[in-house]
Amino acid sequence: MGGNQRRDTALSQFWPYIMILRFAGTRPLCVNKTFPGTGNTRIKLGFKFFSPLFFYSIVMSSASFYTFFMMTLNWMFKIYWPQKLFYEHPMLVARDYENPMGLLISKLFMLNHCSFPLTRIVVIWSQITNFRPIANHIEDMIQIYEDLQKHWENRGQEFSSTIRRNILHIILISMVMPLVSLIPLITEIFLKGQPVSPVVSNEPFMLFFLIQTTCVFVDDADLHIQCKIVSEVYHQIEMMIGDTRRFNGINLVQVRIWHQFLHRNRRLCFKIGKVTKIPQLFAILNLNVGAILFLYSVIETLNPVKDHNNHNILMATFVSLTFSVVLLYAKTLRAESVTKSEASLNQALFSLTNDMESPEVQLELKEMQSTMITAPTAITLGSYAKLNQGIFLTLSTQVVTYLIVLLQFGKAAP
């Protein structure tokens, strides 16, 4: 297989991933050019001025900024200039000020609604300003795939990968998620027996809003896809080890190739948390705040002194928070799968090291093991949080702490 054919195969494997990133309008990735390296050609991603994709990104990003800016003014500050996007206040549930419970739940939904446009503005700006690092990161993932393909070709064996199939599966699920996210609204409509959706005053802007809502799940899909790609690379390295051990024997050159792939893949793992940290940290923050206010609302509901009649709203809120917890749990499982893939590779190396007679090969293998044992791979969102199931313990501690503070303020209030 020639270099151009390999490059085309690599692009075809990653093409669904590039397309889903283009859809968001903030990452107008296109294959600008390829330039010669050391005997190879390297894929270069960028953007083309005055191309349809470039204009689509400008329209989507500009309209998104304007829409979310107006939503923030309308909802949070009740400023309706230069435009009022909704004829009615866009609460997912009917407001009830007859008792403290109704007021508190209304504030809960107000907080959730106002936080969404603010966070989307920050996420969009972050993805636009970090376009080049994001493009470089994707180039590195495509390049390591192409190099793996070339390595198997040089060994005279067929390269087998499930990257494209896994990407398509993740994209399909991410497209279904916006429909699933409507369950809280559908629950409230069913329980109250009347429609509660806002009346839109400008349908084109509502379309942009719905597209950007879908992009929230595209950001999650981005994290899942990247984790799946690096896990696949670990699996390929492990397959190389097993195949070489069975047929060809192991020499120092082969071990150093494995070591190079390992270092490159670990750098990719580090960059995953770096390029996805903004949307993921905001998702965790929104879940944390929502859980605090929800539990406080539950405690207020259990107060026998007060009369409450908004249990249906509380149920819809519970469904919404449960959905957010499930999404976070799925992301922690995906991130932990990367760590498990590296641990599986480390175990394969451990069983191999003692069988080597060459001191140089043993030393190289032990260096690989030492790298993985000393600093195991983990998906870390910048320097703020490590994405694993331990994050639920951290969130629980924060929720309980701030819940106690809210209850103390509630008792002190007249």
Image (cartoon, rainbow, N blue to C red):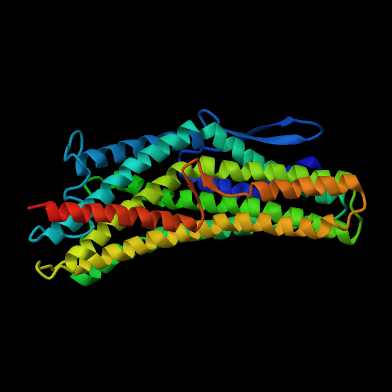
397 shown above or below 56: below
Seen at 47% across and 48% down, the residue is 219
Seen at 83% across and 58% down, the residue is 352
Q: Is residue 6 visible?
A: no
Residue 158: x, y in percent? 81, 56
Residue toward you, 206 or 320: 320
Residue 284: x, y in percent? 40, 51
The number of numbered discs placed on residues in the rendered structure image is 0
| Farthest top residue in view | 49
8 with respect to 38 (left or right): left
Q: Quadrant of residue 63?
A: top left
Q: Is residue 206 visible?
A: yes
Seen at 9% across and 68% down, the residue is 305
Residue 311: x, y in percent? 19, 69
234 with respect to 357 (left or right): left
278 with respect to 375 (left or right): left
119 with respect to 21 (left or right): left
Residue toward you, 115 or 33: 115
Seen at 30% across and 65% down, the residue is 318
280 shown above or below 45: below
Residue 144: x, y in percent? 71, 44
